[in-house]
Image (cartoon, rainbow, N blue to C red):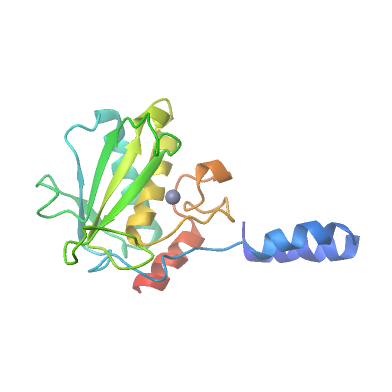
Amino acid sequence: MKKNVLKGIMGACIITGLIIVQVSPTFADVKDYVTENNHVLIGGVTGRHYYITKATESKYVAPINNAINDWKSATGNLVSFTRTYDTYEVEAQATIRAKSYPNYPYNDANGYTEFYNKKIDIDKVQPNYCDWQYTEVHLNTYRIQNYSSDLIKGVVAHEMGHTFGLDDNNSNPGTIMCQTGSGRNVTQPQSGDVAGINYLYK
Ligand SMILES: [Zn+2]
């Protein structure tokens, strides 16, 4: 939802009186994007590589490629990730695997992203504390196996947003960084998501 639309709604609420008490605080918190304390993918998001693990079922490959192409178009090529068939440890900044996670703690997530930085003692890092060199994006086929290709693409685009440094933005269902459980209603990056990428890398 665009900001000027929200202003219009809030204006209407002021006129109608009581409704504003409940409605305006919610709308006032709507964000275009949320970062991980401004931490980023080291080396940026331009001219990078992604790797799809060989165990990933073929039906996930097209949605993965399409999600990354959507980021490329939405950001005017600021985000540009090319698929590599080399081993992910050598070249890729994002390794993507589709696998079934029926057990805690990932059974309630469509996907999750892990962050790594080999330059510090502990390889796996918390993105809100430091930058990262690469990520592993996990798609939970336990949950998304019956999703349409478009919905799978949305899950990948959301997790790739994490790879770039965007955090969940559950206040705004009109961004790809809103979680599905919070009502995300889009399957590709929106202007708010792009604003986050521009803020971090431009
Ligand atoms: Zn998320």
What is the quadrant of the N terminus in the image? bottom right
**Is residue 152 shown left or right of residue 115?**
right
- Count of numbered marks: 0
Q: Position of residue 26 (x, y in %)?
A: 69, 59
Kindly identify the residue that appears in the image at 64 percent across and 65 percent down.
3
Please provide percent x and percent y for residue 28. 68, 65
On the image, the x and y values in percent for residue 79 come to 31, 61
In the visual, does 172 lie left or right of 118? right
| Foreground of the two, 106 or 39 | 106
Residue at 44 percent across and 63 percent down: it is 194
Q: Is residue 48 left or right of residue 200?
A: left
Quarter holding the C terminus?
A: bottom left
Q: Quadrant of residue 73?
A: bottom left
Residue drawn at x 85%, y 57% as measured from the top left: 19
Residue closest to the far top: 146
**Depth order, front residue of 119/86:** 119
- Residue 167 drawn at (x, y percent): 44, 58
Residue at the image point whose x is 26% and y is 39% from the top: 97
In the displayed orientation, state which residue is furthest to the front.
121
